[in-house]
Image: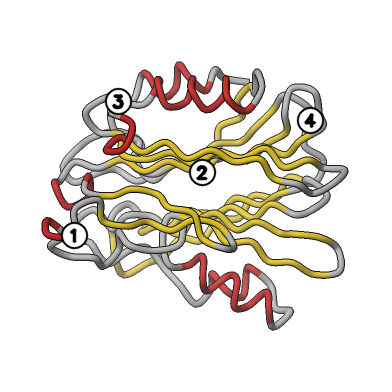
Amino acid sequence: MENLYSLLQGNAYPGRGVLLGRSEDGKSAVIAYFIMGRSENSRNRIFVETEDGIRTQAFDPAKMTDPSLIIYHPVRRVADEDGVTTIVTNGDQTDTIRDFMLREESYVAALNTREFEPDGPNYTPRISGILYPCGSYVLSILKSLDGDPECCVRSYFTYDSPKAGMGHFIHTYEQDGNPLPSFCGEPRAVAMEGDLDTFTQKVWNSLNEDNKVSLFTSFVNLETGEADSRIVNKHQNA
């Protein structure tokens, strides 16, 4: 396992990141989602709570120039007889996955209707995570083939029995650049340490100070299903 905080500290611009895993004591599933930005429009955002998760919102509506691709619901929860499933993504595919689940269709069928974002030349990957009530989870990425928008590569990674103290981390960009290079390989296996507040503070402090925008974290009790969550916004916590 790699050190999550070192990974973040060593990358000035991983873009947007999804992490799912199991707490150090094994009692909770762990969720983290962060957004970063290089442009004023991307940085002009905060996370706000909703009834079933969170959404992005302009911090200063007067400065918002283009809401497409940056205003969406990163986290939505879907309840059924088995408990609550949490969907975490970097775009409006959150809603696509939720809608398919409500029709009792699979996340694969949902994501097969989507592809990377139409923001050439970056063609930002769509990254998604699905956390099931039992604590198992899926991470996925939809990206262009080596920057070629004619081909969409869809990869799915399923983790049936996560180990205590382990998480898996996927992000949109390998590093900063122009154009931005898409994430490569499998999700990184990382060590999970500490309680929710310690974890939240360490992740936030590890993100590049100039580029970080917002962070959502949550510990979901695997016995009760109760979620304890945190939101950190650069604009509101400066």
Crowding near pointer 4: few (<14 within 10 Å), some, many (20+)?
A: some
Q: What label does residue 61 carry, if any?
A: 1
Q: Would you name the residue on which mark 4 appears? A: 163
Name which of mark 1 and mark 2 comes first in the sequence. Answer: 2
Name which of mark 3 and mark 2 comes first in the sequence. Answer: 2
Please state which of residues 57 and 111 is positioned toward the viewer in this rendering: 57
Which residue is painted at 28% across and 58% down in the image? 123
Q: CA distance from mark 3 to mark 1?
A: 24 Å
Q: What label does residue 18 carry, if any?
A: 2
Q: Judging from the image, what secondary structure is the residue with disc 3 in?
A: loop
Q: Judging from the image, what secondary structure is the residue with disc 1 in?
A: helix
Q: Would you name the residue on which mark 3 appears? A: 208
Front position among marks 3 and 1: 1
Q: In the image, residue 142 lies at what x, y percent?
A: 46, 59
Front position among marks 1 and 2: 1
Name which of mark 1 and mark 4 comes first in the sequence. Answer: 1
Q: Up-down: is 151 above or below 202?
A: below
Q: Quadrant of the C terminus?
A: top left
Q: Judging from the image, what secondary structure is the residue with disc 4 in?
A: loop
Q: Up-down: is 3 above or below 16?
A: above
